[in-house]
Image (cartoon, rainbow, N blue to C red):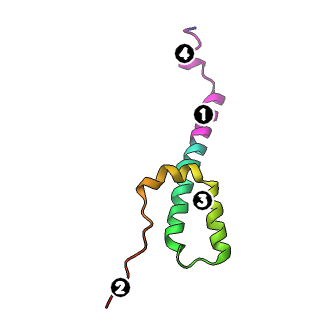
């Protein structure tokens, strides 16, 4: 049993597979939703109907990551300039 847990027995394929899974999960849970949030924040009030449908698709596609990032973001309307 002690021989199975030795780091020398872990093959290169296992390390590559684990790093690939970690990279893809980080991309799906953090990077893509952060990009979608940035895009939504920039284009929310000026988007066309096709672009808005694309926004909704991206939110649906990256929903778990959106839930992770949602407590840190603010989508309140911007203040109006009164003169």
Where in the figure is residue 79, as x and y percent of width and height? 37, 78
Q: Is residue 75 above or below residue 14?
A: below
CA gap, disc 3 and disc 4: 42 Å
Mark 1–mark 4 Cα distance, whole angstroms, equals 17 Å
Label 3 to label 1: alpha-carbon separation? 27 Å
Residue 15 picture quarter: top right
Is label 3 in contact with label 1 (beta carbons under 8 Å)?
no
Which residue carries the number 2 mark? 81
User: Mark on residue 18?
Assistant: 1
Q: Position of residue 63 (x, y in %)?
A: 59, 53
Describe residue 75's horizontal placement relative to residue 33 as left or right: left
Task: Work out whether mark 1 precedes mark 4 in sequence or the reverse, and give the earlier one.
Answer: 4
Start-end of magenta stretch = 2-22
Measured Cα–Cα span from mark 2 to mark 4: 65 Å
Q: Secondary structure at mark 4?
A: loop
Viewport quadrant of the N terminus: top right
Residue on which disc 4 sits: 6
Q: Residue at x 45, y 66 (%)?
A: 75
For label 3, the SS is helix
User: Could you tell which of marks 3 and 1 lies nearer the N-terminus?
Assistant: 1
Height in image: 62 above or below 9?
below
Residue at numbered disc 3: 59
Which of these two is toward me, 82 or 61? 82
Q: CA distance from mark 2 to mark 3?
A: 30 Å
Residue that sits furthest to the bottom in the current view: 83
């Amino acid at each position: 049993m002690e021989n199975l847990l030795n780091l020398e027995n872990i093959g290169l394929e296992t390390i590559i597979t684990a790093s690939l899974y970690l990279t893809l999960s980080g991309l799906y849970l953090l990077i893509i939703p952060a990009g979608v949030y940035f895009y939504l924040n920039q284009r929310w009030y000026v988007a066309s109907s096709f672009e808005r449908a694309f926004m909704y698709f991206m939110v649906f596609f990256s929903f778990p990551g959106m839930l992770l990032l949602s407590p840190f973001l603010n989508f309140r309307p911007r203040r109006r300039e009164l003169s």
